[in-house]
Image (spheres, rainbow, N blue to C red):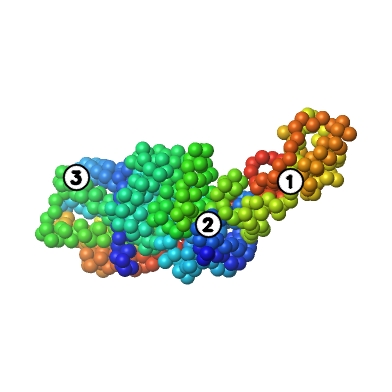
Amino acid sequence: MPDAIVAEGLVKKYGDVVALDGMELTVPEGTVFGLLGPNGAGKTTTVRILTTLLKPDAGHAKVAGFDVVRDARRLRAHIGASGQYAAVDDHLTGAENLEMVGRLYHLGVKRAKQRARELLERFDLTEAGDRPVQGYSGGMRRRLDLAGALVASPPVLFLDEPTTGLDPRARASLWDVISELVTAGTTVLLTTQYMEEADRLADRIGVVDHGHVIALGTADELKDQVGGDRIELSVTSAADLEAVRRTLAPLAVGDMQIDATALQVTIPVTGGAAALTTALGHLSTERITVRDAGLRRPTLDDVFLTLTGHEADEKIKETVR
Amino acid sequence: MNTLQMALADGMTITKRNALKIKRAPDLLGGVVVLPIVLVLLFAYVFGSMIELPGMSYTEYLLPGIFVMTITTSAQITGYTLTLDLQKGIFDRFRTLPMSPSAVLTGQTVSDVITNVTSIVTMALVGLLVGWRIHTSPLEAVLGFLVLLLFAYAFSWVTATVALALRTPEMFNNVATIVSLPLIFLSNAFVDSSRLPGPLKVIAEWSPISTLIQGTRELFGNTSPAMPVSSAWPLQHAVLASILWSLVLLVVFVPLATRLYKRAVSQ
Ligand SMILES: Nc1ncnc2c1ncn2[C@@H]1O[C@H](COP(=O)(O)OP(=O)(O)OP(=O)(O)O)[C@@H](O)[C@H]1O
Ligand SMILES: [Mg+2]
């Protein structure tokens, strides 16, 4: 399968800030690549370079066979992009916004109008389609912006945090739209803060930190990379947390996570069920009351945390070494 | 589609977008229709009745000045809209599209021509009601309107340049107000510029605004032999000088605005 997106050694600096530092990625045609990373990791900068909005200071990239710097003009006919912040025109109606985009893709007046209606329907905006965007909610704007990226049915699609700000129903329906597009052969590069989204949509995930990819693979491969299983247990009193940590430290194969509010401890282990039994045995010897205990596979959250040392989402947890 | 066809088609698409915006934005519409009416009525009734000129009515003398004052003000819509668009990120959308890169600025400035036609027609009609008359041939009168529109178009590129250099709507509005007032008052719009003191007189006589006002007065016949025109070259050849000024502004500011646009959107 040929590659729809190839980026090699991308570097971008803003004064002293190094936004990208040797960014590499390869996305085969017809697959979804998810860029995952904490705030400021360089996701948006990568997308902006690949969509010709920004020139890299070093390195090069090809999208759909076109160099993003040298062939920028020709490349634009083959990509659709939706940025992190909705770029829609407040005074125009939803339909007029999409029609304008269609005409700028040179679809022709009639086709542009028709395409606008199709997309409004697909994104559940038919009713609002003839109202100025000024009166749209954040989620409606977001959907309109995404519809704008699909106007020309481009073979390669870039979506920067496409579902941020969408309600669960709109998110699920966008996931369906993306799945349909990919089935029909579209290549998608998306950035996301939601592990669930990357897990569900992306064929391959690149974890980004400090401007380059620090881990790459399918969701399963990444989970394996951070090591076997997790014991998750909760205790009845905060006073027990320290005792749990001390007792189970020899079992842990990585950083233990202690959530002092939820009275929960997560311990990466090897050996699955046997490890759980051993752990519970130690705790009962120490007379620590366990309210709930279980064994689970690592989530992408764990991957993220282990690899970047940052928390993926807003939950505040305390990491104890 | 070749490059030129694409530039034209895309320019038209953006023009249509801006025209829709102006139609839907009451603040912009007020500046295009309401303000010109208020200005004409105010000046005609307040000053027109108080000031006597030899051989002609003050209202006739004033109207060309008010035309010019209005078009320089509404050319600022280009600058203001550009700064708003810069903040909203809509240019990011445009720049990922296979559109002609020149279309944003041409579309923006051309839509200003539409608003200028609207406000000039409004002012001319209200002017006729309050006693302003055209005393020349229809051809000269049409030329008068065209010279106004050409200058207005060139001036839109000036405000576009200023806007792309300043980038925020607040900054742009402040600077535009501070600059445009002296530009109008240091001219022959309301008074005979040759009666201004020393250096102010030189500035007023060589100001493109004075040139354009004088040129418009001549083409509409709003002049009087009893009111001699200053001997400064641009005022003696006001129509030609107005056209030259417009061309010079275009030659300087079209490339400048284009450069600044590229810089402003590629960060
Ligand atoms: N225009 C700019 N000027 C200066 N610094 C910038 C600019 N754009 C990005 N940066 C810096 O580059 C780095 C990468 O930013 P980028 O927007 O790519 O991160 P991100 O991964 O998209 O983050 P987020 O999850 O918050 O959207 C950050 O440190 C940011 O501060
Ligand atoms: Mg971002």
Q: Residue furthest right?
A: A285
Amino acid type, mark 1: Asp
Dot 1 and dot 2 within a common chain:
yes
x and y percentages locating residue A164 in the rendered image: 53, 44
Query: Which residue was labeled with disc 2?
Result: A31
Q: CA distance from mark 3 to mark 1?
A: 82 Å
Hey, which quadrant is residue B218 in on the image? bottom left
Query: Which residue was labeled with disc 3?
Result: B126
Q: Disc 3 vs disc 1: which is toward the camera?
A: 1
- The quarter of the image that holds ligand 1 is bottom right
x and y percentages locating residue A83 in the rendered image: 49, 52
Q: Chain of mark 2?
A: A
x and y percentages locating residue B266 in the rendered image: 49, 61
SS type, badge 3: helix
For residue A243, side relative to residue A130 (left or right):
right
The residue positioned 57% from the left and 47% from the top of the image is A200
SS type, badge 1: strand
Amino acid type, mark 2: Thr
The residue positioned 61% from the left and 59% from the top of the image is A19
Q: Chain of mark 1?
A: A
The front one of A234 and B29 is A234
Marks 1 & 2, CB-CB < 8 Å contact: no
Taking B12 as reference, is A198 above or below it? above
Hey, which quadrant is residue A215 in on the image? bottom right
Residue A229's mark? 1
Amino acid type, mark 3: Val
